[in-house]
Structure formats: C-alpha cells, structure tokens
Image: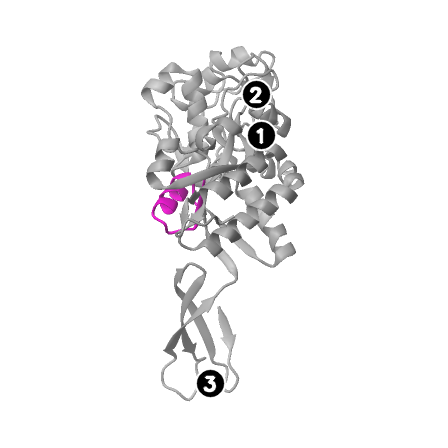
Amino acid sequence: MSRNKPGWCSAQLRFVLLHQQGNIKYYAYEKICCPGTCSCNDTRRWLGFFSQYSSQRDYWRGCSFPYPIYAKWAEAYKAKTGIGMNYQSIGSGGGIKQIKAKTVDFGASDMPLKPDVLEKDGLMQFPTVVGGVVPVINLRGMAAGTVRLNGTVLADIFMGKIQKWNDPAIAALNKGTRLPASSITVVHRSDGSGTTFIFTNYLAKVSPEWKEKVGNDTSVAWPAGVGGKGNEGVASFVQRIQGSVGYVEYAYAKQNRIPHALLQNKEGVFVAPEANAFKAAAAGADWEHAPGFYEILTNEPGRASWPITGATFILMHKVQSKPASAKEVLNFFDWAYANGDDMALGLDYVPLPGRVTKIIANAWKTRIKDTNGKAVW
C-alpha cells in the first residue's frame, strides 16, 4: 500500500502489516524517496509504527465446504448492517484447532464433533446449512452427468485399484458410453478437511476394504493421487489435469463448471447432485434429539437421496470471555437463518427448516454464557 504525502516531493509512504490480533492491525511505515527528487540521502527509511482498529470482523476460520454461502451471507449482512464478517477458508482441521486453542472466537467444520469431545473442550456446535460432496471429473467430451459411478467403484478408484477410465467395473455402469483408455489421476485434499471427512465417511460405509485400510477422518493416508489445498485447490487441479477425478462441495463444481458424475444411491438409483437430492438425504435427520447436534447424513435411504450429503457446523465456546463478540456472532447467524434461505438455495445448499433454527436459538440461550453464568443470547 502506498500513499503520497504533500511536501515530500514525490516521496511515498509504504505501510507494511506486521501483525494482527483480533481486529486490530499493527503496521510499520516507511518513507520511500524517488531518486533525484528528495534532499535526504536515504532512499528508504523506517519512520514508525501504528495500530489500526478495523470494523471488519476477522476472526472466523474453518472449512471451505460452506465458504461460498458464508461469503454470500457476509456480503449481504454488511450491506444491511455495515458490519463485515471476513471468513477465512482454511479447512475443518484448522478451524477445529484454532477454536480449541481459542485463537478465534468461533470456528467452522464439516465434521461434527462428538458430544464427549464437545464436553471435554467446553464447546457447543450448531449446523448452518446442508450440502453435497460430488465426484468431479475431467474427461474430454464428457459433460456433467455422463459418467455413472457407484460407491464401490469410487472407493476402488481412490484406492488406486482402478487405474483406467475404460476399466470393466466402470464400463459395466456406463453401457453405451464410450470411455477413454486413458489413465485416472486421483485428486484429494492435502489439508485437514471436513469435506474429506464426509467423503471418506461415505466410502467407509460402502466399501469394507476402504474402511479397513484407509478409514474415515478429516485427513487420511491416501493410497493414490495428488493433493490440493481446500475445495478451491482440488477444483483447480481437476480443471487442469486431463483424466482426473476429485471431490468437492457442489457449489465449487457448479461455479467452476466442472463436470460431475452421477452416483448410485442406497436404493440403487443413479442421482444427480442438486438441492432437492441433498434435502432428501437430510429428511431423516433428527436434530432435536441429536446430542450436540451430532448428525452424519451420508448414504441415507430414499430414492431421491444424494449419497454424499453433509451438514456444516459452527463451533463456539460455551463460556465466553468476550460476550459482546459472541453476541455479534450469534446476531449474524440469526440474521442468516431468517434472511439467507434464497441465497443458500441459489448456491444449491439446503437451508435448515424454521423448526430446526428455533431449536438452535434455544440452544444458544441455554448453552452459551459469559464468565458470570449469564446467557449471552
């Protein structure tokens, strides 16, 4: 950043961000003189330091799965209230670590924490939207929905057991489709990721071999492939690598126009990823009786259900040392629940029903308190 200062010939000030704590930024600044225009001998000299309070809230970090809708909500919220919410997409693993370390006021994760873990770390969680993880492919001439896959074949591809697109197992699901004899390049996440948790949770449910050899977590020892950071990184790699297959949250496939595969669900029906398919998968979720809102929505029954569906969650400490900040966070999500459904649907996320958001608001009242035990919400 540079800024002209009157009376200094054509000298400029350059501001360098040294450190940020919460929403206070600490800068150093220096004078930079243009050669031949300044009387001083130094062409560059440090002058001092200052801090700047920013009205932009910058302490919200976590999964990339919901980043498109959180960014959309934040933009609309700022236009309505003047309060900016800057969400940093660093992956669910990073979001969980930072909320546990109390370096952020709240974190975001696509992997729900189990009730005993929440209790141990003094946290509460609540869902915000439901979405779908989709297999995306890069095969020349193959449009979205052309290639059909099932869970077993998808697991074998990601285990490196199926290495060609015209493998008999893929061909059996795609009769009448001319598949290339090219090699398959697997693209997976390189960072701790809730999207990976949802994806591997599904593979572990449909493939005993995957469950035994690879397992289900935000980060696993991938048997094959290359890693991309965030949904953004996987989408970028798949777009660039011919013959590749990866997995991303659906909004990333849609926004980047990356072809997706159809998936065979638990009822044997090949379905396309769309909001109604995610909604069908989430229809059986019992949020009211789920301890800690712990619900996993993969491989759910229903002819219209998308098999790799998941909710995304916000994590907050139950005891708030900064209750005003916590209240501001809850104000944002209260506003999003009331006003953000159309924005969510526009990005193919499924908003939570009103009866569920009321349950969540009641949980805020009873579970989030200040250090004196007074309810924050």
Regarding mark 1 in the picture, which secondary structure is present there?
loop
Which residues, given as a range, are shown in magenta?
90-108
Furthest-front residue in this view: 373
> Does the CB distance between marks 1 and 2 fall below 8 Å?
yes
* Amino acid type for the residue under numbered disc 3: Thr
**Marks 1 and 2, how far apart in space?**
9 Å
Q: Is residue 265 visible?
A: yes
Residue 146 position by quadrant: top right
Residue 188 position by quadrant: top left
Q: Is residue 100 magenta?
A: yes
**Marks 1 and 3, how far apart in space?**
57 Å
Label disc, if present, on residue 147 of the rendered structure: 2
Where is mark 1, residue-wise?
259
Earlier in the chain: of badge 3 and badge 2, it is: 3
Residue displayed at 47% across by 30% down: 246
Earlier in the chain: of badge 1 and badge 2, it is: 2
Earlier in the chain: of badge 1 and badge 3, it is: 3
Where is mark 3, residue-wise?
37
